[in-house]
Amino acid sequence: MTAPLISTHQLTYHYGSLQILQGLNLEVPKGSIYGFLGPNGAGKTTTIRLLLGLLKPAAGTVELFGQAFVRHRVPILQRVGAMIETPSLYRHLSGKDNLEVARRMLGLEKKRINQVLEIVRLQQDAHRPVKHYSLGMCQRLGIALALLSDPELLILDEPTNGLDPSGIREMRELLKELNQEHGKTIFLSSHLLSEIEKTVTHVGILDKGLLRFQGRVEQLQQTALSASTLEVEVDNLLLARELLLANGYQIISSKKQRLRVAVQEKEEAAHLNQLLVLGGVSVSGLSYAAQSLEEVFLSLTEPQVAEPVNSLSFSILPA
């Protein structure tokens, strides 16, 4: 089995008495697009800074390319390109001149500038001042800067943050191209699964410094399919809650005469309906839904927040 390109073992970080990361064990496979997900404040940017050696962990280790970061810092960083939060750009200079400044610092050949401009599709705007760039263009220029040294690994912090739907689509296409055509392993953070679920191959979900899930997207999809709910509309919410809880059902949420109840199979709908009606509760509607990926993400980071989507509704005849 191939060793992961990024590996952390019990990585821990705190700021004063505030615990930011707790025993983080990341495994990012070579050739993957790894989506590092979590709400704002979960510890994603802190993790990225630890991976790049910009912060020192309180405990634990970081390995990149199978080497301990603490012992091989310089050769490791020569194989990594990164963009943390908003890219640092000289706004009075053109996009090409921004790349030229970085090229000279890195001692690279001039032809590399045109190569990365072509990759991020900024050739037509290369001579425009950056102050006239859209946010999406600035993000792509930031990625061009990260690509200058032709790194094997790209680490991107919220690359879709603030982009409109068109910009998100362009970023998604660019990341797939970098991965599939240029062979880059990509580690990117985001607080919105919906923006990157069509892009990533692997997912890690971080919440309050703890890794709640890690694996392939297909594994998360399987979790979603196995996590089904019924939404029940009733005339007596309190009585319905009492009956369901007394009979061992898990109530996910309840409001405005509606309850969301965890179920294993669609067939439970008939039993649940009969239970409520015989208990004196009038049921005016039921809808069944397998959870979406977004709902699973929210259930791992914000329990009982998600609302059902794409429900398959059906009528229930009075008993």
Image (cartoon, rainbow, N blue to C red):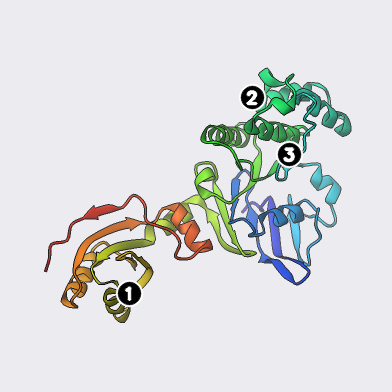
Question: Is 227 in front, or is 130?
Answer: 130
- Seen in the picture, residue 283 relative to 243 is either above or below; the reply is above
Seen in the picture, residue 128 relative to 149 is either above or below; the reply is: above
Q: Quadrant of the C terminus?
A: bottom left
How far apart marks 2 and 1 lie (CA) works out to: 54 Å
Q: Position of residue 26 (x, y in %)?
A: 65, 58
**Numbered disc total:** 3
Task: Give the quarter of the image for residue 177.
Answer: top right
Label 3 vs 2, first from the N-terminus? 3
Nearer the camera: disc 3 or disc 2: 3
Q: In the structure shown, which secondary structural element does the residue marked by tag 1 occupy?
A: loop
Question: Secondary structure under badge 2?
Answer: loop
Identity of the amino acid at label 2? Answer: Arg
Left or right of 175 on screen, residue 283: left
Residue shown at 41%/53% (left/top)? 292
Circle number at residue 249 = 1
Tag 3–tag 1 contact (CB < 8 Å): no
Q: The N terminus is located in which quarter?
A: bottom right
Disc 2 designates what residue?
121
Q: Which mark is residue 279?
A: none
- Residue neighbourhood size for the residue with mark 2, other residues' Cα within 10 Å, grouped as few (<14), some (14–19), many (≥20): some
Looking at this view, name the residue that lies furthest to the bottom.
246
Which amino acid does the dot numbered 1 rest on? Tyr
Inter-mark Cα distance, 3 to 2: 17 Å
Q: Nearer the viewer, mark 3 or mark 1?
A: 3
Question: Where's residue 16, x and y in %?
Answer: 78, 69
- The residue labelled by disc 3 is 87
Percent from the top left, x then y, of residue 186? 64, 43
Pointers 3 and 2 in contact (C-beta within 8 Å) = no
How dense is the environment of label 1, judged by Cα within 10 Å: few (below 14), some, or many (20 and up)? some
Tell me which residue sits at (58%, 37%) in the image.
163
SS at badge 3: loop
